[in-house]
Amino acid sequence: MNKPQSWEARAETYSLYGFTDMPSLHQRGTVVVTHGEGPYIVDVNGRRYLDANSGLWNMVAGFDHKGLIDAAKAQYERFPGYHAFFGRMSDQTVMLSEKLVEVSPFDSGRVFYTNSGSEANDTMVKMLWFLHAAEGKPQKRKILTRWNAYHGVTAVSASMTGKPYNSVFGLPLPGFVHLTCPHYWRYGEEGETEEQFVARLARELEETIQREGADTIAGFFAEPVMGAGGVIPPAKGYFQAILPILRKYDIPVISDEVICGFGRTGNTWGCVTYDFTPDAIISSKNLTAGFFPMGAVILGPELSKRLETAIEAIEEFPHGFTASGHPVGCAIALKAIDVVMNEGLAENVRRLAPRFEERLKHIAERPNIGEYRGIGFMWALEAVKDKASKTPFDGNLSVSERIANTCTDLGLICRPLGQSVVLCPPFILTEAQMDEMFDKLEKALDKVFAEVA
Ligand SMILES: *Cc1c(COP(=O)(O)O)cnc(C)c1O
């Protein structure tokens, strides 16, 4: 085998890339990363980048957190791997389940582990299908989500995801129903107030339930703030308007907290920030501060009890992953929860969020920024060709990609999403690092807008 020379060429020759624009990759090459320092990553050429994406939202404690590394090392030495089948599980798994129920918004509950957020959503759907069938409603199987939602990439969680790109897989599967995205700035109609917009979405939900039949709907899934859809906080009063309708028709509400969970919005959970109580929570990403692939379904008291009854009746829940409840992942998650909640990380998010917003507000005065939006440490700037009419730039101009690429050249990683640029830095970010982030971003915005506007 004749191996090419450079890291970039070796990467491109033998690796397949997920969610990567190939023409842009061929032009720019791969950033091959060797290590990280705090919120920075360093590539094979020694270049440093401030990663304002926290990896993929998940490296909230940065890339070299000593306490997390030590927790992983210690657990690898004690007991490096086990499962949670056949009535066995590690002591770390026992402790993490207790901890997750303790920090959840629930008085009691139960936890089931997966390796990712997609699998946790997939698992939750299977739990609902199983539960409703066991309760004599085998037809209660449809899943309600929203357009622009991101719930993952497995066949089921991709079907829940409300993105047009999944059509290349022939998805969504039948029975996955998408409702209007609660983004007032973009989907509010001419002359419609935010309140009227929310009322319209509530009406749409009720009409959808009546049209499909409440007895055919297994559950409703929502991210408190949509993440990969472009950081979309709900319109004001959205959850308060839709929750009573879902309750009225006996449809379980699942909060997908894969991004929002553990501090991203400033609180432990996004549902706390937006003041609603779901029936179950999906966690991943921040759960281990990105130091281990792991997801969790956290069931509240009612679903726990109903599921227990259903499982006892057939004596076994036939589901689980080989690495579910992996002891190293659980040990890391225990440490990560402690670090985020007790070592000042969530507090740093709350402390610096106003400063974050202040800088964005200033940036959004530019004629080519339509709006800024977000909360805590998750924000987006939306580029527009025309501010008053909210007209987007021609898609062929790839404006957000150009901004992100220019940022990369300046040593800042941020993410283009549609016509917006997303900033979701690690929670350890200092004020000086925040200034660096915004100074680089402003430079990139000025350069790109001068080219395209
Ligand atoms: C990332 C994400 C998922 C999927 O998690 P994976 O670990 O990538 O499978 C699910 N839901 C939300 C809200 C996410 O952001």
Image (spheres, rainbow, N blue to C red):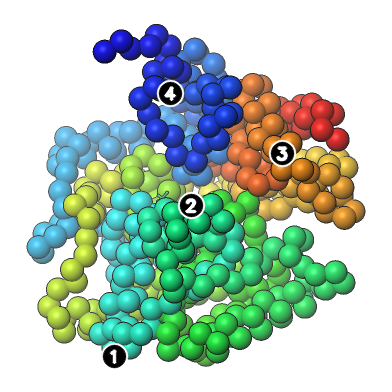
Type of residue at label 4? Glu
Instruction: Identify the residue position indicated by label 1 in the image.
Output: 136
At which x and y percent is residue 248? 52, 90
Instruction: Identify the residue position indicated by label 3 in the image.
Output: 396
Q: Residue at x 60, y 39 (%)?
A: 415
Q: Secondary structure at mark 4?
A: helix
**Residue 63 bears which disc, if any?**
none
Instruction: Identify the residue position indicated by label 4 in the image.
Output: 12
Earlier residue among tags 3 and 4: 4
Whether residues under marks 3 and 2 lie with C-beta atoms below 8 angstroms apart, the answer is: no
> Would you place residue 5 above or below residue 243 in this image?
above
Disc 4 vs disc 2: which is toward the camera? 2
> Would you place residue 42 above or below residue 179 in this image?
above
The alpha-carbon separation of the residues under discs 3 and 1 comes to: 52 Å
Earlier residue among tags 1 and 2: 1
At which x and y percent is residue 37? 48, 25
The alpha-carbon separation of the residues under discs 1 and 2 comes to: 35 Å
Earlier residue among tags 1 and 4: 4
Earlier residue among tags 4 and 2: 4
Residue situated in front as seen by the camera: 3 or 310:
3
Q: Is residue 428 visible?
A: no
Q: Secondary structure at mark 2?
A: helix
Disc 1 vs disc 2: which is toward the camera? 2
